[in-house]
Amino acid sequence: MHLEIVAVGKLKERYLKQGVEEYLKRLKPYARVDVVEIPEEKPAGSLTSAEEDRIRTREGERILSRLHPEAHVIALAIEGKSLSSEEMAEYIDRLATYGRSRISFVIGGSVGLSPDVLRGSDLLLSFSRMTFPHQLMRLILLEQLYRSFKIIRGETYHK
């Protein structure tokens, strides 16, 4: 299985970098995982609605240009579908069973994802109705992917 995380922005905090590195290491026996960082647009002053739209559009174009055409695309979006850890494991296992072994997870920047990215995704996935920093979401996603593979393999993992 080949997993790709396409994320807007670079990790800045050392503790997030360490956590991401730890889960990437833990995932190695289960899947190839690549992290692609998309440059984040820097706002010119205060963010108006039009400026937010412009940022989403530019970041969205960069995201779409990096997605593999055969990838099953899962965009993290607050308005998406909520899954339990077991349901996410089942979803990933089902994709692998039916030959969809390339999955791209998309994490938007601070103003969210463009409508084009959302429309082009196979699944909109919500981790919560709460808002999380997009850098923290990368760590949370990797932990849940690791948990999914442990569930799929029937291996124990702390609860």
Image (tube, rainbow, N blue to C red):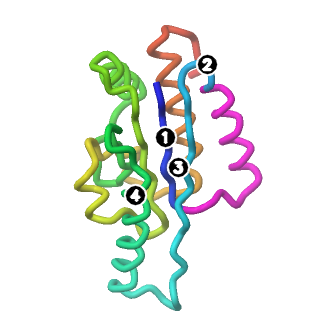
Query: Which mark lies nearer to you, 4 or 3?
Result: 4
Residue 95 magenta-highlighted: no
Residue shown at 57% from the left, 11% from the top:
156
Query: Which mark lies nearer to you, 1 or 3?
Result: 1
Q: Is residue 38 left or right of residue 69?
A: right
Q: Whole-percent x and y of residue 80?
A: 29, 48
Residue shown at 52% from the left, 49% from the top:
137
Disc 3 designates what residue?
137
Disc 4 designates what residue?
65
Which comes before the other along the chain, label 2 or label 3?
2
Q: Whole-percent x and y of residue 67?
A: 39, 49
Disc 2 designates what residue?
29
Q: Specify the segment rendered in magenta.
A: 9-27
- Specify the amino acid type for callout 2: Pro
Looking at the rendered structure, which numbered label has been put on residue 4? Answer: 1
Mark 3 element type: helix
